Amino acid sequence: MTKPTIQIGHEVREMTDEEYQQHIKDQSDYADFVSEEEDKKTLKEKTLKKLGISAEEFTALLS
Amino acid sequence: MAIQTFTTGQTLTAAQMTSLQGNDYNWTVNAQTASYVLVASDAGKHVTMTNASATTITVNTSLFTAGDFLRITNLGAGTCTITAGTATVATAGTLALAQYASGVLWFQAAGVAYFFPDQVSGTSGLVRVTATTAFTTQTTVSMAASTFTSTYNNYIVMLNVNSTGSAAAATSFRVNNAGSPRAVSGYYGGAAGYNSNGATSGSASSNASAFRVGDMSTSTVQAFQINVYNPASATIKTSMSVNGFTYSDTVVYAQALSGGCIYFTAEANDGLTFTFANTCSGTYAVYGVLN
């Protein structure tokens, strides 16, 4: 299987096994981050809906 | 033509005289393409270095005599560093030559040399150490080994990123030790974003394996100025502060970023690695700041 490339200085080459494993981990970490952010956003929307107020009104309440 | 040694009774030919005179206007070039150790016959020559990666030119004692001089020019994209071997080399500027930087190495004594760089007039300031370097459709881009050296206290990195895919172009930074990205845990920092739609956002990195910024999900254009503090110190923890801007033309959305990060292990770091959640193209350039 062809691995993604990596650029070091001006040199472009295929990733080593170690670099590829790190690349996979980076992609996985980012996917987890996006998922967590989505969960937070969904929770916020649900909470505001239960309270019956908009995001702007919630901000005004806190100020 | 190299320096000639004439002996008593020897006839100086017209060709030799013409060649010697010619060296005043057309220096003999010693073109190198890999790290090099100066030799005695380099006196009076123009030593050039051409290599895309970092190289060194080493200066040893007992090869040159007092008053000898030679010119050194870096033609390559990789930084060429004049290194004291067994001789001492002092300078008012920098011994790390960026591409097209040049200067004269003069010997006060056989083991005492001074380098007079053409492009630095003071003992402090901002010097470009890595010319603009382009990358195309990469998820991981590392600076060449030894980009950060003890020649400078701090560094400024100008990074421009264009996402070439449809997904996110989230950008993260790592420091490199001996050319290898430090992907272990220990990055603590946060970046706050101020968005054009009035919202705020944040990217937290707590004991993470990289410092993440630029998380706007459909970002297509990113630009960062990264200040890197004390990267070449083995005793002071490397820290970074970032100012940046991201923009997406798919949702007409822009975000200004600022943040900072500490790499929580004190060791000498010689560059940065950029990682992207999606393949990106762009450029970076590196400047050394001497306090």
Image: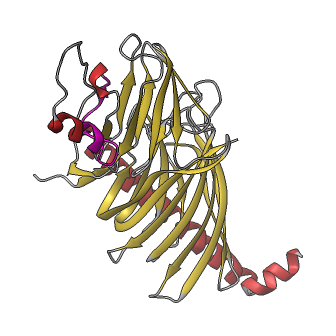
Q: Report the quarter where the N terminus of chain B lies.
A: top left
Expressed as whole percent of the image width and height from the top left, the position of residue B137 reads 28, 66
Q: Is residue A13 left or right of residue B239?
A: left
Q: Quadrant of residue B284?
A: bottom left
Residue stretch in magenta? B20-38
Query: What residue is drawn where x is 56% and y is 85%?
Result: B253
Give whichever of B134, B131 is nearer the camera.
B131
Q: Is residue B53 magenta?
A: no
Along the line of sight, which residue is nearer the eye, B200 or B117? Answer: B117
Percent across and percent down for residue B192 are 67, 64
Residue B203 in the figure: left or right of residue B184? right
Q: Judge whether residue B198 can be spotted in this image.
A: yes
**Magenta run includes residue B28:** yes
List the single residue furthest toward the right: A63
Residue A19 position within the rendered picture, expressed as x and y whole percent measured from the top left:
29, 43
Task: Say above or below: B67 vs B211.
Answer: above
Colouring chosen for the image of the structure: secondary structure
- Residue B33 visible: no
> Residue at the spot x=73%, y=87% of the render?
A54
Query: The C terminus of chain B appears in which quarter of the rendering?
Result: top right
Taking B273 as reference, is B168 above or below it?
below
In this view, the residue in front, A48 or B14, is: B14
Count of marks, rendered view: 0
How far across and down, in percent of the image, does residue A49 sit? 68, 83
Residue in the foreground of this view, choosing between B55 and B37: B37
- Left or right side of B103 for A61: right
> From this viewpoint, which residue is outermost toward the top?
B62
Image height of A7 relative to B144, above or below: below
Query: In the image, what residue occupies the spot 77% across and 86% down?
Result: A56
Q: Residue at horizontal 64%, vertical 67%?
A: B257
Question: Splitting the image into 4 quarters, where does residue B140 fall?
Answer: bottom left
